[in-house]
Amino acid sequence: MNNLNSIILEGNLVRDAQLTEPAPGFKKCAFSIAVNRFFKNRKNEDVNEASFFEVEAYGKMAEYCGEKAKKGRGVRVVGRLKQDTWKDENGKSASKVYVVAEHIEYKPMKKVEAEEAAKTQDATPPEKTEAQTEPQTEAQPVPVEAEAVF
């Protein structure tokens, strides 16, 4: 029996995604997201706790991610945790845990951000704002290539 290994993160991109091709025909997109948690401590003070997560996407999802994943943009990532282990130059064991994305949804960009992105992408039309998008009726899966409204 397989154990459960699933994670959902919602946050903002820390920097632009980096699209690479480590092997011919194999695309990899790597990015970091910041996830905020707001709560009140015992003294009833507001506390903002930020956590940072490394995410990787592969294949067609990586190509799309390379186009859409820009610094500051909101994302929801559904995926699994993966751990890489290796020996460093001194022979000590080292490891890294990161998220392998299986599904990514992008929050709509604000109008100003969309216009700036259009200028840098040579006349790509700005994306619709939340007010311009049609409301979703029932929960339906959002394809990787679609913009998600949440």
Image (spheres, rainbow, N blue to C red):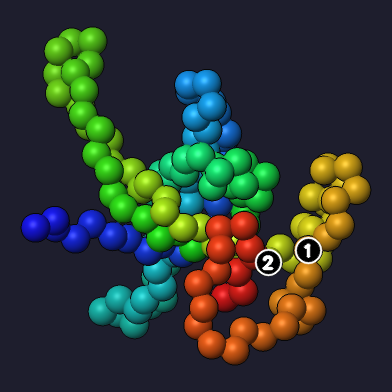
Residue at image position (9%, 58%) is 1
Label 1, residues with CA under 10 Å away: few <14, some 14-19, many ≥20:
some
Q: Is residue 119 above or below residue 24?
A: below
Query: Rounded to the nearest whole Å, what is the CA distance between mark 1 and mark 2?
Result: 7 Å
Q: Residue at x 35, y 78 (%)?
A: 40
Q: Residue furthest top?
A: 89
Q: Which residue is mark 2?
A: 108
Horizontal arrangement in the rendering, residue 97 relative to residue 1 (left or right): right
Q: Nearer the viewer, residue 117 or 15?
A: 117
- Measured from the top left, where is residue 124 in percent x and y? 85, 51
Find disc 1 in the rendering and name its residue. Answer: 127
Q: Residues within 10 Å of mark 2 (few under 14, many from 20)?
A: many
* Front-lying residue, 9 or 28: 28
Return the disc, 1 or 2, that comes first in the chain's sequence: 2
Looking at the image, residue 20 sits to the left or right of residue 44; the answer is right
**Horizontal and vertical percent for residue 92?**
14, 18
